Image (tube, rainbow, N blue to C red):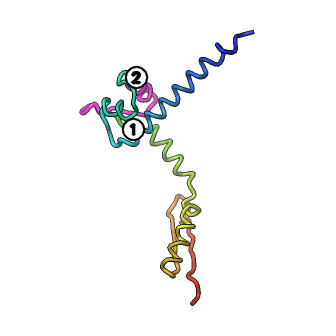
Amino acid sequence: MADSNTDTAPRRQKVQAAEVGTDILTALAELAPATSLSRLAEHVGMPASKVHRYLQALMASGYAEQDPLTNHYGLGRAALFVGLAALGRLDVVKLATPHLAQLRDELNETCFLAVWGTAARPSCTWNRRYAP
């Protein structure tokens, strides 16, 4: 039977590596559109050599890219794909409805929201003003 400490050590390293990678991706988003290696390393509080190793892996997988003219780093196409997938899951009408009701109450006017989507018709909601 294998030692439980040796079984969990590689898994813990992989989890830590994933956390570092997502920290770097988040920093690339915060420093968008592009940033230098030194600024990125300072932002995440890691040595530049460590950040550079992670950037190499992120670039190989398409999550980061480097501008050949400036050598600055930014988010890559794979990051865009993930971001767009997350946006596609948002129910904008559901999120906006409480704010629409608040606006209606402040203005005492009927408020309408239409969100153009990929469907044949836009998603819509409205809140009537209170009758006088």
Amino acid type at circle 2 is Lys
Image quarter (top left, top right, bottom left or bottom right) of the C terminus: bottom right
Closer to the N terminus: mark 1 or mark 2? 1
Residue at image mark 2 = 50
* Left or right: 59, with 128 as reference point: left
* Mark identifier at residue 28: 1
Where 4 sits versus 102, above or below? above
* Left or right: 1, with 51 as reference point: right
Q: Tag 1, which secondary structure?
A: helix
Image quarter (top left, top right, bottom left or bottom right) of the N terminus: top right
Q: Position of residue 81 (x, y in %)?
A: 48, 42
Q: Residue at x 40, y 42 (%)?
A: 29
Residue 79 falls inside the magenta stretch? no
Distance between the alpha carbons at the discs numbered 1 and 2: 15 Å
Amino acid type at circle 1 is Leu
Chain part drawn in magenta: 51-72
Q: Position of residue 9 (x, y in %)?
A: 61, 17
